[in-house]
Image (cartoon, helix red, strand yellow):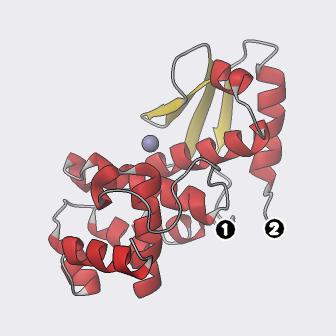
Amino acid sequence: MKSPKIFVVFSLILAVSLVYAIDFLVEDNTGNSAGMKSQTNNPSGRKPVTMIKLLMENGAGVAYNDRDEIHFNAGYLADFRGDVRREFRGVVYHEVVHSLQWNGMGQAPVWITEGIAEYVRLKAEYAPDHWVGPGGGEKWDKGYDVTARFFEYCNELMDGFIVELNKKMKDGYSDSFFVELLGKEVNQLWDEYKVKYGQ
Ligand SMILES: [Zn+2]
């Protein structure tokens, strides 16, 4: 099912919050949805989070997650041209991942954590139209859409790669994780990825 209950709730929150200034507490019920399944079904594969708070605010940018509080700029949605509900869902997926993923005790580079968050969004089929396509981007460490597409390739090489990468990031971070999981340096993986897509 592509629309688990939580997103019905989110949609209602969105509709109401654009009219009234209300704080909502949102419980993490995403355990069986497509994008979160690999992260949430295995307790060792995610941080032990039971509550994520979503705040619709008059802020800047899009959204950010600070200690399991997702601060969502309502103005971003008000100005968004396109499918607002789809964009909202995609951003929420991204921000919820930040609550569930490991970050190498703070050592993991931002491009990895942002790439994984966008990878989950991609797998949930909420990738925005403006993203680069498969094989796009200059370098694996651009983060966001570029890294998410690259991670999709890595996960094709080894099913479960992202889950295992995240687990390894529980206690620290090293580029050697790519060698340990896929047998190749990240540079080489990127070069082969670009060749695959003729770029
Ligand atoms: Zn992020």
Classify 28 as above or below 43: above
Q: Position of residue 54 (x, y in %)?
A: 61, 31
Could you tell me which secondary element the residue under label 1 belongs to?
loop
Taking the image as drawn, is residue 158 in sight? no
- For this view, does 168 lie left or right of residue 44? left
Taking the image as drawn, is residue 139 in sight? yes
User: What quarter of the picture does the N terminus occupy?
Assistant: bottom right
Residue type (three-letter) at the residue carrying disc 1? Ala
Q: Nearer the viewer, residue 45 or 76?
A: 76
Q: Residue at x 62, y 54 (%)?
A: 127
Q: Residue at x 36, y 65 (%)?
A: 166
Q: Position of residue 95 (x, y in %)?
A: 52, 43
Question: For disc 1, does the CB lie below 8 Å from ligand 1?
Answer: no
Label 1–label 2 contact, CB within 8 A: no
Classify 188 as above or below 7: below
Residue at the front extreme of this rendering: 198
Residue named by callout 2: 1
Mark 1 is surrounded, within 10 Å at the Cα level, by few (under 14), some (14 to 19) or many (20 or more) other residues, namely some
Q: Position of residue 37 (x, y in %)?
A: 60, 69
Q: Which mark is drawn over residue 82?
A: none
Q: Residue at x 22, y 87 (%)?
A: 183
Q: Position of residue 195 (x, y in %)?
A: 35, 79
Which label's residue is closer to the chain start, 1 or 2? 2
Q: Nearer the viewer, residue 45 or 96?
A: 96
Classify 158 as above or below 91: below
Mark 2 is surrounded, within 10 Å at the Cα level, by few (under 14), some (14 to 19) or many (20 or more) other residues, namely few
Q: Which mark is drawn over residue 34?
A: 1
Classify 88 as above or below 100: above
User: What quarter of the picture does the C terminus occupy?
Assistant: bottom left
- Tell me how far mark 1 sits from mark 2, CA to CA: 8 Å
Q: Quadrant of residue 46?
A: bottom left
Could you tell me which secondary element the residue under label 2 belongs to?
loop
